[in-house]
Image: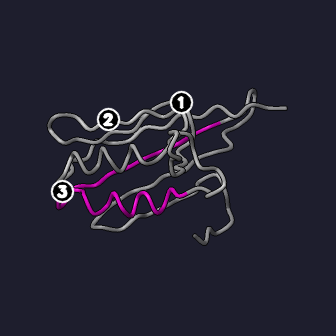
Amino acid sequence: MATLQAATTSTGALVTDPQAVRQLCENHCFGTLNWEVDDDGELVIWGYDSFEVYEARENGLPDYDGGIVTHEFLRSLAEYLEPDEEFDIQTAGFTKCRFPVLAKRYVIRDGEVLYADLSSTEPIDE
């Protein structure tokens, strides 16, 4: 069985309410990805995992039964971006000795969440 290895990185984006964004992120699980809202209100997400977001249970673990809520999370986050800010999250992954099998990109721009699955030729309907 092949093990997927993925890396995710984002641009930084300034948010209007750093505390509300911290709370939003704390209420969600990002696998092993890291996130930070610094003192200047800049949000970044990075790490060695695919960007998939789940709601967090009371014990802090992901609510897998609730399913992936990546788009819902990003729509909520879009409300907190400073005007004219753009937040770009990219994930690329592969299995050992193979070509890339995972390439995803999410962009929040002008209050909208744009999504591209570059690893698939099938249209995505989410």
* 67 relative to 10 in the view: left or right: right
Q: Residues within 10 Å of mark 3 (few under 14, many from 20)?
A: some
Residue 80 shown in magenta: yes
* Disc 2, SS: strand
Q: Residues within 10 Å of mark 2 (few under 14, many from 20)?
A: some
Question: Which corner quadrant holds the N terminus?
Answer: top right
What residue sits 39% from the left and 57% below the top?
107
Q: Is residue 66 above or below residue 95?
A: below
Q: Nearer the viewer, residue 99 or 62?
A: 62
Residue type, numbered disc 1: Tyr
Indicate the position of residue 98 as horizontal and vertical percent values: 74, 33
Mark 3 residue type: Glu
Q: Residue at x 22, y 34 (%)?
A: 38
Residue 34 left/right relative to 126:
left
Q: Which of 108 and 15 lies nearest the eye of the viewer?
A: 15
Where in the figure is residue 100, as x and y percent of width and height? 66, 39
Name the spot of residue 89 as percent of width and height, x first. Answer: 42, 47
Label 2 sits on what residue type? Answer: Glu
The residue identified by callout 1 is 48
How far is disc 1 from disc 2 in space, using C-alphas? 15 Å
Q: Where, by quadrant of the figure, is residue 77 drawn? A: bottom left
| Mark with earlier residue (2, 3) | 2
The disc label shown at residue 82, or none? 3
Query: Which residue, given by chain and number where applicable, does mark 2 sit on?
Result: 36
Q: Nearer the viewer, mark 1 or mark 2?
A: 2
Residues drawn in magenta = 69-93
Marks 3 and 1, the one that precedes in the sequence: 1
Query: Earlier along the polypeptide chain: callout 1 or callout 2?
Result: 2
**Marks 2 and 3, how far apart in space?**
16 Å
Q: Left or right? Give the position of 59 relative to 113.
A: right
Q: Does 9 lie within the magenta span?
A: no
Q: Residues within 10 Å of mark 1 (few under 14, many from 20)?
A: some
